[in-house]
């Protein structure tokens, strides 16, 4: 990410921090298998679009994505592809996992958060995402995990593989 992307006719960087939220802001990402499934579906679509998913992290009721190589897409189109495909795929193939908390024909809320990320180091991105994620999980530890002393937020941090 510290390097500019070079293609035949352009040189530059187009990187975004995105946040997507399930419909009704339900905490469907408590379960590790659900997080892994949603991550796999999002990765599948991002790869198909020719984008690069540098990092993905989950809160109980949202997902953060750090996407690079976005030069071919504006933000609304990119979001439409990611949310549209993942919603369709998850509802079609795995609806039983979510039907207790989500209903109707939506998986994601209508809105989303995005911010453009310029040329920064991967260490800055690691720091930002880890700081943000820590605060989301701090106040949302389920009773079953409080009893064991295990912290869910340590399970979902995978940024060491991100590079630096």
Image (tube, helix red, strand yellow):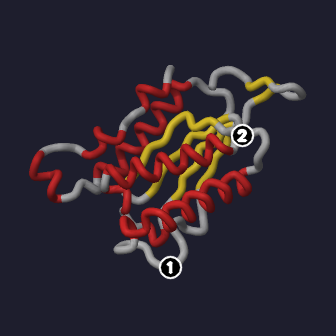
Q: Identify the residue under disc 2.
A: 70
Rendered location of residue 17, percent (x, y)? 59, 44
Binning the other alpha carbons within 10 Å of mark 1 as few (below 14), some (14 to 19) or many (20 upward) gives: few
- What residue is at 69 percent from the left and 51 percent from the top? 78
Is 137 located above or below residue 117 in the figure?
A: below
Q: Is residue 156 left or right of residue 106?
A: left
Residue at position x 62%, y 44% in the image: 46
Q: Is residue 5 above or below residue 35?
A: above
Q: Circle 1 sits on which residue? A: 104
- The location of residue 73, given as percent across then percent down, is 76, 47
SS class, disc 1: loop
Instruction: Give me the residue at 34% from left, 74% from top.
Output: 100
Image quadrant of residue 7? top right
Where 24 falls versus 138 (above or below)? below
- In this view, the mark in front (1 or 2): 1
Tell which residue pokes out farthest to the left in this image: 147
Q: Position of residue 116 (x, y in %)?
A: 67, 42
């Amino acid at each position: 990410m510290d390097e500019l992307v070079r293609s035949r006719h352009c040189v530059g960087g187009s990187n975004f921090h995105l946040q997507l939220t399930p419909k009704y802001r339900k905490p469907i990402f408590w379960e590790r298998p659900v997080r892994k499934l949603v991550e796999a579906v999002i990765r599948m679509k991002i790869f198909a679009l020719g984008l690069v998913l540098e990092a993905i992290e989950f809160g109980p009721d949202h997902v953060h994505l750090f996407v690079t190589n976005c030069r071919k897409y504006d933000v609304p189109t990119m979001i439409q592809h990611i949310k549209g495909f993942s919603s369709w795929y998850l509802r079609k193939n795995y609806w039983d996992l979510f039907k207790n908390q989500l209903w109707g024909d939506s998986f994601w809320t209508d809105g989303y958060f995005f911010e453009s990320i310029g040329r920064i180091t991967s260490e800055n991105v690691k720091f930002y995402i880890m700081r943000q994620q820590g605060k989301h999980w701090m106040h949302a530890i389920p009773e079953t995990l409080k009893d064991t002393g295990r912290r869910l937020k340590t399970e979902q941090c995978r940024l060491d593989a991100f590079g630096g």
